[in-house]
Image: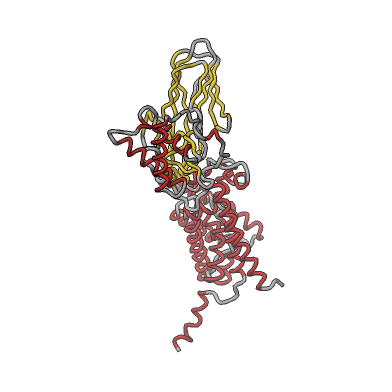
């Protein structure tokens, strides 16, 4: 005999296990708990234009993006008629390479990516090497060195760490750019290179990267140079023109550490332009398109063929119908015809509208009871009687389908999903019940079955419930735990409390 304490512990373990696995699946696969969750998706297109040199093999290498802070790469595609295309890793940088034996005239290649905003995604930290700094080709003159030291000292005095130092340094330089007299350092040099040189002189680990500033419905955009500063094992991105960190998340890092954006052999005059558009897509659809090849990605119903998925989408709703039936029978005290006949009726309702399903069920059972009363006069054996009822039910289904078709109702589909054998047994059980206990009991159990079936249908047809059952099947462990708890209930049913009304009035 299992003790009560052990049973409670077992139920608790089942519940916690179901919740834990569901959370782990959510974390790994990014399947949302809410079915209506949506994410912002950027469709980005890089267009490469160049002129092919006649009768020469051509190789075009374009630096490609990877997952970065605030964004996750979900889909990549190359459109390049006649070209071979591969993604390779060179010096730790992901690049796309197009190749063709011969081409002539102006050529256009396309790279498309689907980028999803994901602020939980951490920026990968790569090994800090000297090559991550821009190779300083700037040599200060004596007067320039004095100016540079003054700027560094001023920014240092107003800062407390590498992040605030960089911010103050950018403010000083941008202010110098707006003044008419300008700055000695910026007269003959690019702003980004001067900023990098000053950071190097101050001993701040940094790198110049190229980022795409995302704006909806923009075309023919170029990459923007940004500064990444290393602070406590974390790369922090700055817009060098306004001293803003990546607070608004509008910069998507395309290539990092000063690596070349495009390299070409066998061609000339290469240019790269970017176009982008912002969309909103269901988070579930994105998660299904990006399952990993390990862990929950492998053990997922979404990997099955669509036909099998459709089957499981219905089967995984059965435990919910069973839970409703257990609750209504054991706790409320509703009488039903057959233990789980209401679940089967509710499953039939899922394939059709509720009204037509109820109409079909009532008509089928009513006609079946009338014909069954005639068969009882023939004194047939049980097997023969049930087999005859099955055939009669099939004829009734066919007849109702034809009538419905002529009247313009789609009743054929709805009645076809009713379990014929179960319907035959239901008619047989109700007929016997009618003979033994009368019509009142038949109406009580029949209406109880329909009530429970409707409640189960309403729970199973709920989009949120269907989403959780299909995408997080481990939550059925909680359903099992609840049914075990209700199975141990030995108290009064709620409907039985009516018997004590007289005590209340006395």
Please name whichever residue, 292 or 344, is drawn nearer the observer in this view of the structure. Answer: 292
Please name whichever residue, 392 or 163, is drawn nearer the observer in this view of the structure. Answer: 163
Please name whichever residue, 149 or 69, is drawn nearer the observer in this view of the structure. Answer: 149
Quadrant assignment for the C terminus: bottom left
Q: Quadrant of residue 307?
A: top right
Quick one: which residue is furthest to the bottom in this view? 506
Please name whichever residue, 20 or 325, is drawn nearer the observer in this view of the structure. Answer: 20
The reply to whether residue 270 is visible in this rendering is yes
The residue located at (57%, 44%) in the rendering is 302
Quadrant assignment for the N terminus: bottom right
Q: How is the image coloured?
A: secondary structure
The reply to whether residue 393 is visible in this rendering is no
Q: Horizontal and vertical percent for residue 501?
A: 47, 82
Indicate whether 288 appears above or below 374.
above
Indicate whether 35 appears above or below 124.
below
Indicate whether 262 appears above or below 472.
above
The residue located at (27%, 33%) in the rendering is 180
Q: Horizontal and vertical percent for residue 103?
A: 50, 14
């Amino acid at each position: 005999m299992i003790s009560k304490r052990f049973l409670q512990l077992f139920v608790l373990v089942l519940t916690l296990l179901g919740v834990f696995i569901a959370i782990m699946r959510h974390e790994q696969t990014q399947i949302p708990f809410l079915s209506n969750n949506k994410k912002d998706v950027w469709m980005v297109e890089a267009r490469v234009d160049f002129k092919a040199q006649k009768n020469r093999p051509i190789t075009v290498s374009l630096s490609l993006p990877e997952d970065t802070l605030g964004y996750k790469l979900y889909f990549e595609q190359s459109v390049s008629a006649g070209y071979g295309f591969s993604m390779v890793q060179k010096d730790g940088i992901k690049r796309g390479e197009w190749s063709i034996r011969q081409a002539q005239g102006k050529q256009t290649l396309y790279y498309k990516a689907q980028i999803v905003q994901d602020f939980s995604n951490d920026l990968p930290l790569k090994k800090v090497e000297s090559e991550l700094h821009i190779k300083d080709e700037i040599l200060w003159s004596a007067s320039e060195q004095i100016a540079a030291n003054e700027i560094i000292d001023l920014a240092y005095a107003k800062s407390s760490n590498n992040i605030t130092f960089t911010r103050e340094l950018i403010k000083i330089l941008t202010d110098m750019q707006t003044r008419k007299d300008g700055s000695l350092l910026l007269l003959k040099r690019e702003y980004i290179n001067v900023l990098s040189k000053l950071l190097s002189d101050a001993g701040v680990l940094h790198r110049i990267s190229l980022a795409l500033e995302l704006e909806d419905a923009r075309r023919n955009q170029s990459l923007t140079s940004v500064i990444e500063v290393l602070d406590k094992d974390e790369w922090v991105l700055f817009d060098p023109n306004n001293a803003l960190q990546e607070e608004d998340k509008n910069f998507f890092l395309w290539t990092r550490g000063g690596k070349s954006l495009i390299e070409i052999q066998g061609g000339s005059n290469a240019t790269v332009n970017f176009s982008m558009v912002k969309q909103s897509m269901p988070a579930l659809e994105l998660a299904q398109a990006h399952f990993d090849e390990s862990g929950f990605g492998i053990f997922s119903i979404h990997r099955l063929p669509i036909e099998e998925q459709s089957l499981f989408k219905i089967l995984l709703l059965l435990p919910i119908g069973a839970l409703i039936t257990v609750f209504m029978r054991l706790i409320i005290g509703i009488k039903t015809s057959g233990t789980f006949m209401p679940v089967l009726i509710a499953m039939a309702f899922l394939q059709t509208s509720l009204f037509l399903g109820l109409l079909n069920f009532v008509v089928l059972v009513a006609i079946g009871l009338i014909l069954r009363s005639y068969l009882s006069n023939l004194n047939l054996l049980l097997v023969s009687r049930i087999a005859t009822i099955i055939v009669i039910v099939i004829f009734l289904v066919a007849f109702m389908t034809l009538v419905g078709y002529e009247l313009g109702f789609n009743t054929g589909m709805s009645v076809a999903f009713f379990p014929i054998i179960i319907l035959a047994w239901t008619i047989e059980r109700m007929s016997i019940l009618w003979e033994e206990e009368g019509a009142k009991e038949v109406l009580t159990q029949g209406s109880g079955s329909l009530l429970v079936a409707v409640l189960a249908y309403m729970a199973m047809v709920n989009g949120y419930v269907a989403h959780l059952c299909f995408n997080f099947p481990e939550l059925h462990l909680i359903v099992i735990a609840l049914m075990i708890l209700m199975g141990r209930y030995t108290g009064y049913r709620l409907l039985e409390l009516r018997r004590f009304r007289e005590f209340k009035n006395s």
